[in-house]
Amino acid sequence: MTWVSGNLELIRELTIQHLGLSLPPLLFGLLIALPLGWLANRTRAGRAVLVNAAGLLFTIPSLALFVLLPVVLGTQILDPVNVIVALTIYTVALLVRTVADALAAVPQVVVNAATAMGFSPVRRFLAVELPMAVPVIVAGLRVAAVSAISLVTVGSVIGFGGLGRMFTDGFQRDIPQEITAGIVLVLALALALDGLLLALGRVLTPWARLRQTAGSGA
């Protein structure tokens, strides 16, 4: 593609910008969602409040949130922190229910055994419940990652960087190659990040691989 070969430096810059806007919210969102999901799993009332509140947050249109946050945070309209905060909110909204469901799926006999061994609730969560909940949490994080990669492109409508600028610029200047390249790159980033999270999940749960190997051997 002629346009791609002549704009490799721009593509590299926009790709780095895109990752810089989409990756931090995944980390921040996970760190916030873990304690909230733990609280949601502790009581029925806590689950109802936190899970429903998270669901409501996800219904806020992304473009409206990008415009509203500068008013709330006191930032400039094109400050990258607006996108990072907005995507962190969406990540939390997606992961609170996932974390709560993952912890609820931990066998009660395992939880009781850890309690009988003298584990405090926090230590039991970190050493027993959280490791066993990793596969479900990683599955939810994969969904959040793909969502974040795609939502960053929405910010290009009001002037944020990232690969979404290839869409707006391509439409404005009638360059179909630029639009196509942007679509392909966003898809490639989403698939690459999804694959990395899948691999990370396997690394963090070696017992699952051993169980699969034992099952196939039988």
Image (tube, rainbow, N blue to C red):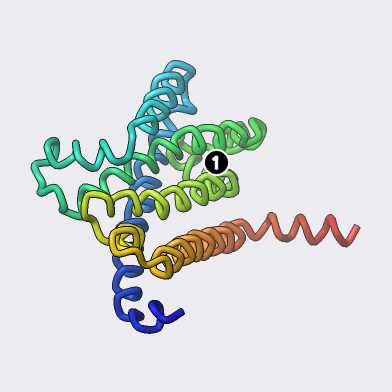
Instruction: Identify the residue at horizontal 14%, vertical 47% (top origin).
Output: 77
**Given the current orientation, which residue lies at the most extreme top position?**
45
- The one nearer the camera, 89 or 41, is 89
- The one nearer the camera, 122 or 92, is 92
- Is any atom of residue 183 visible in this view? yes
Q: Position of residue 124 (x, y in %)?
A: 50, 40
Q: Position of residue 63 (x, y in %)?
A: 28, 41
Q: Position of residue 216 (x, y in %)?
A: 85, 59
* SS state under label 1: helix
Residue at which label 1 appears: 129
Instruction: Identify the residue at horizontal 40%, vertical 35% (top origin).
Output: 93
Q: Amino acid at mark 1?
A: Glu
Instruction: Identify the residue at horizontal 47%, vertical 52% (top origin).
Output: 146
- The one nearer the camera, 214 or 3, is 3
From what the image shows, is residue 101 above or below residue 17? above
**Given the current orientation, which residue lies at the most extreme front position?**
174
- The one nearer the camera, 193 or 167, is 167
Q: Quadrant location of residue 2?
A: bottom left
Q: Quadrant of the C terminus?
A: bottom right
Q: Is residue 36 left or right of residue 207?
A: left
Label 1 neighbour load within 10 Å: few <14, some 14-19, many 20+: many
Instruction: Identify the residue at horizontal 29%, vertical 73% (top origin).
Output: 13
From what the image shows, is residue 185 above or below residue 152? below
Number of marks: 1
